[in-house]
Image: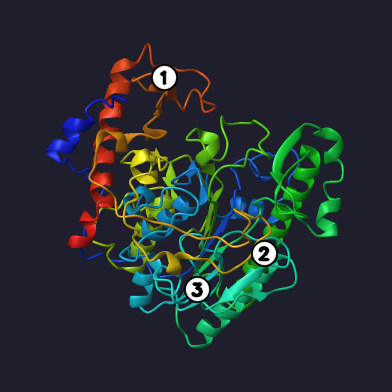
């Protein structure tokens, strides 16, 4: 495989400076309480306010109508564990070896919970974790990474979930999982409010990840779908935990029931904040962790699905409410990302981001419309973690594998197990092979997508004008080669910075 300019970039050790170095920051308003929520596999189009023909999301629609609607909000990666790592650290997941689902991050990473906890916030995590084991002895559990309290799962979950409280033995909870998480989070919020302590609350729902299950009343809302969508799709069986094939209409009926239940739980949270007199001074955020999963993707309005670097794999719902600061409804087309959460909230809290490369930017200027264009590119890179260097060379585990073993069971079985384990490795010395994997850069209106090809030393390149062609249907590469070359140079330079972080260089400072 030939990667243009990779060797030169490695040799000169160019460092892409998207970094936000430690420096004094002055908050522009009183620091808010913060509630950050995320759905699991909830794609951009699966909301009422984005015009979906079936799914009902009245609460998210109300948030979109009254708060800040981020219509070009991106997950930092087309799959879950990597996006969650970016959400917590403001950094691209490849910087910390969180390459794919089931890859943990590293203990040296500095999370938003760690920073806010040091600033006096009470920090709680509720729901899916999936960036390491949740048990208390894990060096990358929620507790080890800055959360004071947690009720969490190693991976995803459905109705009647098993969850671990503060790293203890898993407990079975009866009921709809989104409702359970919000109830527990509100108890945490009330305790913090009683102590007059600002709170940072992360709620990562298990919905709407497959396998799907819904309450009878929610399922009834979508009884017409089995007759409308009859093609067969592959997913997990709730009965066996193994793979099965079902009618897409039946699958969508259950999936949309989960989304509606999650939406209702978010409404419960918003109402409680209002009733408790906390809503005015609380920033409430919602997004998905990647695009719609292939079993449920209907093919509109974007190309691709979960696992792909096209828009359908990374565009997700993005909403922010904070009545004290966002005083009027606003919709923005400025591109933002899960990596932007850390620098933005650090700015609001008046604290400095870590003195290491940060891929996100402070997007608080969107609250009042002062930020009108993203000043730096957005990058997506699905690192090729199946290379021979990682599968046969057997690099040293970054964390003792025993500490990476999960404890919380779920329906879907992998290797015969109902629990999930994690991995992370000390990266071998960088070679040109490390620049491989599906990747993209968005800079202004243009997006370059690169895929390596098994039968060719030259990668496949696609250039899209997202303003004219948001569905990525027309490849402009032949007529815009100069634009493509400039974008590829920026992408390669950024990858060099990421690989430098991956080597552990950031932790030496």
Residue beneath label 3, please? 135
Q: How is the image coloured?
A: rainbow
Residue 185: tell me if it is visible: no
The disc, 1 or 3, on the residue closer to the chain's N-terminal end is 3
Residue beneath label 2, please? 178
Residue 67 is labelled as none
The disc, 2 or 3, on the residue closer to the chain's N-terminal end is 3
Q: Is mark 2 on a helix, strand or loop?
A: helix
**Can you say which quadrant of the picture contains the N terminus?**
top left
Q: Which residue lies at the image location 47% right of the left edge and 44% below the top edge?
A: 74
Q: Which residue lies at the image location 68% right of the left edge and 71% below the top edge?
A: 180
Image location (x, y in percent) of residue 200: 47, 71
Residue neighbourhood size for the residue with mark 1, other residues' Cα within 10 Å, grouped as few (<14), some (14–19), many (≥20): few
In the rendered structure, are the residues bearing label 2 and label 3 in contact, judged by CB atoms less than 8 Å apart? no
Image location (x, y in percent) of residue 451: 42, 27
Marks 2 and 1 sit apart, C-alpha to C-alpha, by 46 Å
Instruction: Using the image, determine if residue 172 lies above or below residue 505.
Output: below
Residue neighbourhood size for the residue with mark 3, other residues' Cα within 10 Å, grouped as few (<14), some (14–19), many (≥20): many
**Can you say which quadrant of the picture contains the C terminus?**
bottom left
Q: Which residue lies furthest to the left in this view?
A: 12
Closer to the camera in the image, 100 or 286: 100
Q: What element carries label 3?
A: loop
State which quadrant residue 305 falls in: top right
Image location (x, y in percent) of residue 37: 55, 61
The disc, 2 or 1, on the residue closer to the chain's N-terminal end is 2
Closer to the camera in the image, 313 or 264: 313
Residue 80: tell me if it is visible: yes
Residue 455 is labelled as 1
Marks 1 and 3 sit apart, C-alpha to C-alpha, by 44 Å
Marks 2 and 3 sit apart, C-alpha to C-alpha, by 21 Å
């Amino acid at each position: 495989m030939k990667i243009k300019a990779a060797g030169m970039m490695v040799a000169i050790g160019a460092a892409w400076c998207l970094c936000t170095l430690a420096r004094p920051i002055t908050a522009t308003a009183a620091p808010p309480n913060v509630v950050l929520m995320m759905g699991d596999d909830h794609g951009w189009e699966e909301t009422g306010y984005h015009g979906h023909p079936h799914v009902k999301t009245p609460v998210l629609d109300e948030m979109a109508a009254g708060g800040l609607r981020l219509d070009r909000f991106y997950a930092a990666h087309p799959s879950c564990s990597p996006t969650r790592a970016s959400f917590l650290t403001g950094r691209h997941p490849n910087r910390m070896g969180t390459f794919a689902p089931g890859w943990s991050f590293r203990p040296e990473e500095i999370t938003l919970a760690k920073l806010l906890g040091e600033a006096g916030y009470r920090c709680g995590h509720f729901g899916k974790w999936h960036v390491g084991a949740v048990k208390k002895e894990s060096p990358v559990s929620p507790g080890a990474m800055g959360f004071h309290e947690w009720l969490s799962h190693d991976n995803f979950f459905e109705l009647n979930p098993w969850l671990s409280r503060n790293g203890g033995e898993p407990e079975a909870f009866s009921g709809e999982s989104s409702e359970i998480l919000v109830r527990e989070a509100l108890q945490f919020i009330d305790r913090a409010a009683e102590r007059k302590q600002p709170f940072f609350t992360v709620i990562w729902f298990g919905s709407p990840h497959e396998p799907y299950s819904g309450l009878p009343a929610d399922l009834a809302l979508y009884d017409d779908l089995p007759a409308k969508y009859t093609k067969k799709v592959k997913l997990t069986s709730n009965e066996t935990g193994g793979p099965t094939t079902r009618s897409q209409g039946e699958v969508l009926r259950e999936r949309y029931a989960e989304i509606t239940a999650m939406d209702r739980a978010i409404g419960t949270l918003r109402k409680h904040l209002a009733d408790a007199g906390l809503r005015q001074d609380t920033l409430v955020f919602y997004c998905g962790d990647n695009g719609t999963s292939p079993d449920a993707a209907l093919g509109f309005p974007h190309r691709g699905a979960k696992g792909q670097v096209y828009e359908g794999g990374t565009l997700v719902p993005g909403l922010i409410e904070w009545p004290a600061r966002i005083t009027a409804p606003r919709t923005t087309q400025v591109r933002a990302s899960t990596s932007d959460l850390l620098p933005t909230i650090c700015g609001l809290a008046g604290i400095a981001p870590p003195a290491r490369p940060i891929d996100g930017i402070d997007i608080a200027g969107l609250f009042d419309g002062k930020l009108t264009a993203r000043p730096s590119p957005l990058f997506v890179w699905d690192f090729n973690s199946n290379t021979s260097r990682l599968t046969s060379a057997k690099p040293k585990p970054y964390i003792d594998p025993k500490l990476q073993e999960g404890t919380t069971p779920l329906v879907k079985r992998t290797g015969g197990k109902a629990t999930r384990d994690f991995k992370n490795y000390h990266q071998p010395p960088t070679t040109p092979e490390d620049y491989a994997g599906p990747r993209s850069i968005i800079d202004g209106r243009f997006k370059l997508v690169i895929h390596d090809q098994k039968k060719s030393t030259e990668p496949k390149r696609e250039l899209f004008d997202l303003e004219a062609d948001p569905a990525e249907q027309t490849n402009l590469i032949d007529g815009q080669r100069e634009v493509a070359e400039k974008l590829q140079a920026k992408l390669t330079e950024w990858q060099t910075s990421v690989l430098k972080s991956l080597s552990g260089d950031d932790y030496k400072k």
